[in-house]
Image: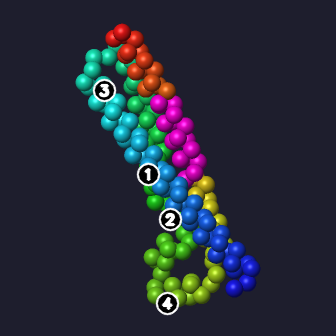
Amino acid sequence: MDRTDANLTAAHAEVKAELARTDTKAGLLLAFTGAMLAGAWTVATSVHLPPAAIVFGAAGVAVLLAAATYLLRTVRPNLGGTRPQGFPKWATLTPEEIRDALSEDDRPAHIAVLSRIAVAKFGRLRCAIDLTCVAGVLLTVAVVLAWLEVA
């Protein structure tokens, strides 16, 4: 195997690993967001809260729902748009066309498409993390306001 072939193989594996890492992080953050929403619902329905706490809590829940939307968009399957590469393209081919397609080295195209998908996923994940942090601040303010009203 020559140097270029080895580099293409390594780059292809790396971009696929980045996609997997991003999906794993998004899945974990989605579970965390769901737990935060469940906790907020439990508190909101079981404790009498002052109006200010309800306003901040509702804002926090709304921001958490926005974060969950970004996370769902992050893990939503993306098959490469109008010019799929690799697996999605193979689903439309006959066995003979697959054999012909596999005889060509289209790793550079795969790397380009998968890299664009990974960068888009990373951007949505980053936005979801920022929104989750904002929601945490809003929910913390709601808790403090509820505690001050009780105290």
The label on residue 96 is 4
The residue wearing badge 3 is 43
Q: Mark 2 or mark 4: which comes first in sequence?
A: 2
Query: Who's the residue at 47% across and 55% down the image?
Result: 24
Q: Mark 2 or mark 1: which comes first in sequence?
A: 1
Q: How far apart are marks 4 and 1 (CA)?
A: 38 Å
- Relative placement, left or right, of 135 versus 2 is left
Query: Given contact means CB atoms under 8 Å apart, are the residues at marks 2 and 4 in contact?
Result: no
Q: Callout 1 environment at 10 Å: few (<14), some (14 to 19), or many (20+)? A: some
Q: Callout 4 environment at 10 Å: few (<14), some (14 to 19), or many (20+)? A: few
Q: Callout 2 environment at 10 Å: few (<14), some (14 to 19), or many (20+)? A: some
Q: How far apart are marks 2 and 4 (CA)?
A: 22 Å
Numbered range of the magenta stretch: 121-136
The residue wearing badge 1 is 27
**Front-lying residue, 104 or 145:** 145
Q: Which residue lies furthest to the front in this view?
A: 151
Q: What element carries label 1?
A: helix
The residue wearing badge 2 is 79
